Image (spheres, helix red, strand yellow):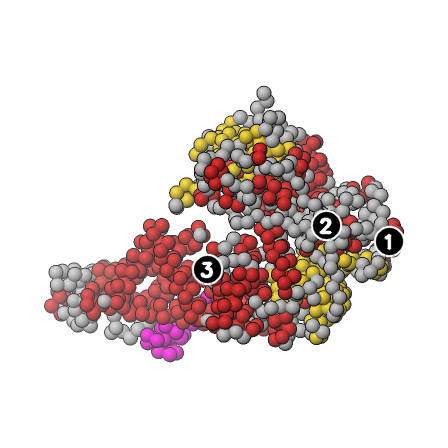
Amino acid sequence: MIEPILAFDAARIAYRTRAGDRVVVPEFSLDLRAGEAVGLVGESGCGKSTLAYAAMGYLGSNGHVPSGAIRLDGADIAAMTEAERARLRGARAAMVYQDPMSSLNPVMRIGRQLMEVPIRHQGLARDAAFERALAMLHEVELPDPGAIMRRYPHELSGGQQQRVVIAMALIGEPALLILDEPTTGLDVTVEAAVLDLIAELRVRHDSAILFISHDLNTVARVCERIGVIYAGELVEVAAADELFARPRHPYTRALLGCLPSRASHRRSAPLAAIPGRMMRPEDRPVGCAFAARCAFADAQRCTTTPISINRDASGGHAVRCVRAGELDPWQPPVDTAETHSVMQTGEPVIEARALEKTYRAARLLDAGAGHEVRALDGVDLSISRGETLAVVGESGCGKSTFAKLLSGLEAPTGGEVRIKGRALGAAAVERRPREIVRALQMIFQNPDATLNPSHSVGFSLSRPLKRLRGLAPARRRDERVRLLDQVRLPEPYAARRPGQLSGGEKQRVAIARALAGKPDVLIADEPVSALDVSVQAAILNLLAELQDEQGMAMLFISHDLAVVRYLADSVAVMYRGRVMEYGPLDAVYARPHHPYTEALLSAAPGLDPSVARIRLRGSASDATPAQAGCPFAPRCPRKQGALCENETPSLQEAGGTHVIACHISLDELADPPALDEGSRDG
Amino acid sequence: MSAASALVLFHAVARSLLLLRYSPVGLLGAGLVAFWVIIALFAPLITPYDPLANDYAALADPGPSAAHWLGTDNLGRDLLSRLVWGARSLLAIVPLAVAIAYLVGCLMGLAAGYLGGWVDALLMRVSDIILAFPVIILYMIVLAHFGPSAINVVLAVAFTAAPQIARIVRGLTLDLRNRDYVAAARLRGERPLYIMVAEILPNTRGPLIVDSCLRLGYSTIAIGVLGFLGLGLPPSDPNWGGMVKDSYALISVYPHMALIPCAAITSLVVGFNLLADAIRELGQND
């Protein structure tokens, strides 16, 4: 039998704290053989990153392995000296972290950072190391590697930085590559390209890969074997296809059930959120850790004795569940509805007319001649009562600017906002009439910044009741209870502070706060992108339910096409401050597509089966802004030449309210693109 | 709303003190400070003599004796009594000066950071001008102009510390003003003053509690120096800096007269600094 590259052998991992040893991982066993790619998936706090750090011997001064062992090349990492571990890192094992900017030294040129690895670990001379670094940059498909070598990290885009970090990890030809959420901070089209790159490099370099992520779909694109982790324990391991087709652990099934996909929609096929939340590692019970949230739990067998992980007959599929054999075969969710959007008629509640925002970046020396950035360039959109408009796009497309202009957090530099038929001109929220202020509320992306950490939940809810509805203290208390109940939080939560809430609970309080003034328009700026999938599903369902109940118009801003498909009635796809495509949900998710929509859909697998993988060059932020022409032209795989570069495309009507801003005829857009080599370099 | 802020501050202070049980260094600091605070509070009960009474008989041998435990100064006044009364005046002046500096500094920093524009430019340029002067020269200018008295010492210390606090608060405000909860407050039509005082100020408390401990230490030194220069409190009142000034000419003959008040100043400053260190460290591990 071949020795595995990395072996977790009943490893227990704990952190020493003031209150004693905190066991994060009770007992973990997993082998990783040469050339194998294994994914570990779990929600935040499940201990997956701890496993990655433990495999690199990076547990820090308070982390330790009290029993069992973690072996790299057969040698126990915990037993090594720091110098031995340092020799292994870079040479035998390398790691890629989530945030590329923090893995690169900001004051060193890319070339020097890359060359360090072969000089230190392989004893290469400077010239040879330079050649090696150049070849590696070429391999990670960065344009003009020679120029990149001379740049500093901040001069590269996020996607390029992550490619450099991957190059740095692979340059020492490690036997083991650990990837900890390597694409989480990247735009969808960039993420797709980086994942393809990892899959290709894996084949070429024959490194074993340990891929850690919160997202099952991401892991499945690279790995052939996937392990699901819950509260520090491996609950199920299987081949990727097997896991998706025949998940056996109730937790795996629940995770798959709350992943938005082509087969889910708020009205016809709602997601099944997982009730409750994961316990802290130190509160882990004797029996199954998931039992408290499990629909199939049996009080007798699940909670009284420790549950071991059992392999099936073939040995490939292991499950830690006593009832796994008794469960019905897995039924993947299906959505049989033909149409999904309920188009609302009637006066729009909120309208944007030719809305523009130009930021002037002041220069240090000549204050007069600043450099201008057009964040929003003539956007016309409107939302009716009860309608959800989703604005989709990658970072820097202007979707958050759009939300800020509508809400009045920033004043537009052109065009106007109308709320309930009232023209507001360029007025920021401080100059808007009271009634309009009440009519529009917002929920935000980051659950940690949305609530004031110094105020109790009760205070955060009472204040808008006083300001926006002028209620007396006694009425405020009653109303507060009603609001908490509406977002499914028990009454005693009013006394808690944000620090005592989980991310999902904070977001619920934020929703309750936004609803306190009974708004006519709710703007949700990426409200679920920082949450775990199980929590995300619950919040999406809550938003849908509250909207149906109260009939408010909703602007839902997101980068995630699967989430948008679940929630929206109409969709606007934005790129560099302009609307590329707008229409009812079903029309936007079916052909004809704008080429950019097509690329976005191809990056999110399974949403439109007719779209093949399209890889875009570069990212939205690295091309220089075109003054005239289509903003997407520099990256467009279907570009028609000079026409696209010189003339701004007008809106083509594609039936009903569906419009596409493209020069290419609708007939041609209805066919999948012919892929040439030019569109295939990442 | 200020009641809410005060409650938040009280909570934070109480929680910090509870956490001190994890930090031996912090306990030592808190012990030193608490020692002097208790001494100051009970000064009339502790002191064996009137701090201004001269015992000319003791001048024959002013060193420590059974009658005068710490000896007497060059005018035969009981050193222990003067030390205790000195603690009382110092521990009244220092916190008051720091509190006034905080009141002014916080308002300046909040306004500059949150409102920005010309308000920011004006407040920060004024601060720059004040900060450009050496502190000791500023004290001398203020006290020479308004005359030495307890209240003028307080104002002089507050005047020089306020711009430093304003800078810290402004920096924190520039970060906090972009938080989503501030956006949410604007979206429900809150006025700028409310946002500054109720939404932003309570969240600056972490760094400010540490800074206030350090600043109590600096101000103790500053007031000691003023006393030494004869610019502090009126001469007859016992104050530690003044006690050093009165006796340092005799240091080779009667070292205890100058060294004991020096040791008192040092122990109080070290106490404040250790406390600040411990709070900072505990804050990081939260």
Q: Secondary structure at mark 3?
A: helix
Residue A218 image-quadrant placement: top right
Q: Which residues are magenta?
A: B140-165
Q: From where the camera sits, is residue A137 visible?
A: no
Badge 1 density bin: few <14, some 14–19, many ≥20, Cα 10 Å: some
A138 sits to left or right of B279? right
B164 sits to left or right of A335? left
Type of the residue with mark 1:
Leu
Which chain letter goes with mark 2? A
At 50% from the left edge and 40% from the top edge, which residue is drawn? A298
At 49% from the left edge and 31% from the top edge, which residue is drawn? A10
Where is mark 3, residue-wise? A492
- The label shown at residue A412 is none
Quadrant containing the C terminus of chain A is top right
At 67% from the left edge and 35% from the top edge, which residue is drawn? A241
The correct choice, above or below, for A102 with respect to B41 in the image is: above
A408 sits to left or right of B70? right
Q: In terms of depth relative to the viewer, which is nearer, A158 or B190?
A: B190
Q: In terms of depth relative to the viewer, which is nearer, B142 or B17?
A: B17
Q: Is residue B161 magenta?
A: yes
| Mark 1 and mark 3: Cα distance apart in space | 57 Å
Residue B189 image-quadrant placement: bottom right
Where is mark 2, residue-wise? A619
> Contact (CB < 8 A) between labels 1 and 3?
no
> Residue B12 placed where, x, y %?
41, 60
Where is mark 1, residue-wise? A666
Which chain letter goes with mark 1? A
Badge 2 density bin: few <14, some 14–19, many ≥20, Cα 10 Å: many
Type of the residue with mark 3:
Pro
> Residue A168 placed where, x, y %?
63, 38
